[in-house]
Amino acid sequence: MASPCKHPQFIGNTCVGCKLSKTECRNPPTTPLNYIRPHMSLSIDEINRLRDENLRSLLTRKKLHLILNLDKTLIHVTRIDKLTSEDKQYIEQNQHEINGDGHEYKMIGGVHILRLRPGVRDFIEKLSSIFDISIYTLASKFYSAQITKILDPKGCIFKNVISRGDCTNRSQKGLDVVLSHDQVILIFDDKKRVWGNYTKNLIQIAPYNFFRFR
């Protein structure tokens, strides 16, 4: 006789196991994990099971899970029309180089300009040997996808990219949507206040402010 469904995963309102609606499954508490699969949510038991699996994997590979913020941690982005005349002149004179491989400046949509924090590419590449690395930002999914493609063009460094729409609280970052146990997570962020009850995992770094404004 088959064991009863434990309703570990839902896609939208449907249980992946038994194909019943969430209401028919007695509305078990779940957490959305849209950054892994759109409209997916997992039960607390399933999340803990996956965290246990992840812990065994990290211990076997002798790694921890590092979470990195984007803006003012790894990069500085601003609108071009807000720059000083000197910065605008530099950009105009070097447009043929900007966006080239290895260049520290990147144009975004012709409206914004990005500056990589000095040494950031070497930083994330070296850390990837001792950490599983994820990005966690309160920016939009579209924006974070653009930036992570610049930082990791081959898509082989960042384990996950968590953005504003993935948070259970849109104004706060939380480890409730991360499939690692808290004790193996380290966070690098320039803002402490966005992490609420998770500041014990945080190493707060100085914000990177490169551009001058007119």
Image: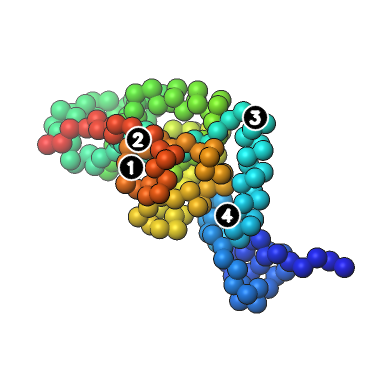
Q: Position of residue 11 (x, y in %)?
A: 61, 64
Q: Position of residue 13 (x, y in %)?
A: 59, 70
Mark 2 or mark 4: which is in front?
2
Check the image and report above or below for 102 versus 140. above
- Would you call the spot at circle 4 few (<14 residues within 10 Å), some (14-19), or many (20 or more)? few
- Mark identifier at residue 61: 3
Judging by the rendered image, the residue that carries numbered circle 4 is 37
Corner quadrant of residue 75: top left
Q: Earlier in the sequence, mark 3 or mark 1?
A: 3
Q: Earlier in the sequence, mark 3 or mark 2?
A: 3
- Mark identifier at residue 210: none
Q: Residues under labels 4 and 1: Cα distance?
A: 28 Å
Residue situated in front as seen by the camera: 64 or 80: 64
Which residue is drawn at the image coordinates 63% and 41% (left, top)?
Answer: 54
Quadrant location of the N terminus? bottom right
Corner quadrant of residue 188: top left
Q: Earlier in the sequence, mark 4 or mark 3?
A: 4
Check the image and report above or below for 1 versus 94. below
In the structure shown, which secondary structural element does the residue marked by tag 1 occupy?
loop
Q: Is residue 143 visible?
A: no
Mark 2 residue type: Gln
In the structure shown, which secondary structural element does the residue marked by tag 3 occupy?
helix
Mark 1 residue type: Lys
Which residue is drawn at the image coordinates 67% and 65% (left, top)?
Answer: 7
